[in-house]
Amino acid sequence: MHRAPVRPYHRWAVAATAGLILAAGLPWAATAIDAGGEAVSRPGDIVRSAPTSFHPLPGQPTNTRAWHIEYRSSTAKGEPNVVSGTVIVPNDGRTGPRPLVTYAVGTVGLGDQCAPSAGFPNGTTTEATLINQVVQRGWAVAVTDYEGLGTPGDHTYTVGRAEGHAVLDAARAAQRLPEAGLSADGPVGIMGYSQGGQASSWAAELHDSYAPELKVEGTATGGVPADLLKVADFNDGNIGAGLILMAATGQNAAFPELQLDKYLNDKGRFYVDYMKKNCVAANTTAGLFKRISDVTVKNPLYEEDWLRRLRESNLGSHGPDHPVYLYHGTVDELIPYDVGQRLRADWCARGTAVRWTSLPLGHVTAVTAGAVPAIDWLAGRFSGKPADGNCS
């Protein structure tokens, strides 16, 4: 009997997936049948969902419906995992297809309480006001918490492939959530800034190989740390030094064989433990120390195994298969402007229609100033207008 070709996500065989879910203490539920009659689970399948609420600011309600979800995704190594997130749909009485934006937030921290979904009911999620601007367009939004935020394990901060998987699978999960009423054939946009810029850019690059069934019309991404080593060198001795240690912690979470602990001194171990328990808003990364040498006995970042893993998170080697709106502050104090310029050049050279926008702003101010033009650009893609790239 002829068997149909197995798609990449059908590596999620029942035995492997059941073992993962049982180990995590989660209920296993098969959601698809392969050509041989066997049950399989797929990235993007819902593990569980429950109603929640979405508030842009404390005490500020919105006319929306929202659900906290746990969904299947993939680690940087391609192994099955479970990620949490939130699906938000305008409660506007509209039926039928509507655009869906899968939104990747910037750096929030390493503690589970930092997850975007944890703050939405209280109006304390940092980018909730920007997400609300997307919702006010009448679009649905899926917001991933990323691997290890709100689910077992440590957050794989700055690990590009894991982030990209989580962003794309959040869109799949939103479309598979019956209560949300979204169509599997509906238009999808990808959006994010800073860590969210890395995550959304990785989702854009992975789309054609990992989630080609999603009808992605465009990606709007900004402040992208497209080269982690250049970003680390730029921040060593500056205000963002804590982000280097936080990124090393995230890489070690994804790749424990890197053995970060053997490179840390007592101060470094203290700060890693502190960061894992707190959020950026609690000053876990700002002003703690000035150089990576302050917290290590030896800088791991230029060790061969670390170099290899860090370079795996670099962007630009594969052009997204859809138009991109890419923006960056010219005086960015955390992500060098030339890192954004290099990403633009790499994507343009690979045939992607890139709309590049420079903002005369720093990293923190550009996230807000760049959001509305980015959303406007996505609106153009959803309405079918031709993408106006400016690569030349």
Image: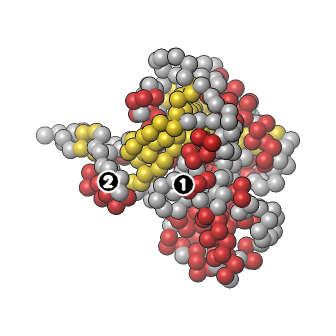
- Quadrant hosting residue 99: top right
Mark 2 or 1, closer to the camera: 1
Residue ID at (52%, 33%): 66
Q: Is residue 368 left or right of residue 208?
A: right
How far apart, in angstroms, are the residues tagged by discs 2 and 1?
A: 20 Å
Q: Quadrant of the N terminus?
A: top left
Which residue corresponds to mark 1? 149
Colouring style: secondary structure
Q: Position of residue 178 (x, y in %)?
A: 39, 30
As rendered, which of 243 and 152 lies closer to the eye?
152
Tag 2 secondary structure: helix
Q: Quadrant of the C terminus?
A: top right
- Residue 226 is at least partly visible in this image: no
As rendered, which of 100 and 285 lies closer to the eye?
285
Q: Residues within 10 Å of mark 2 (few under 14, many from 20)?
A: many
Q: Position of residue 312 (x, y in %)?
A: 56, 59
Residue ID at (29%, 45%): 29
218 lies above or below 115: above
Amino acid type, callout 2: Thr
- Quadrant hosting residue 278: bottom right
Q: Position of residue 154 (x, y in %)?
A: 53, 62
Tag 1 secondary structure: loop
Which residue corresponds to mark 2? 17
Residue 268, numbered label: none
Q: Is residue 336 left or right of residue 57?
A: right
Amino acid type, callout 1: Leu
Question: Which residue sits furthest left?
Answer: 1
As rendered, which of 370 and 115 lies closer to the eye?
115
142 lies above or below 236: above
Q: Position of residue 10 (x, y in %)?
A: 32, 46
Residue ID at (24%, 39%): 33
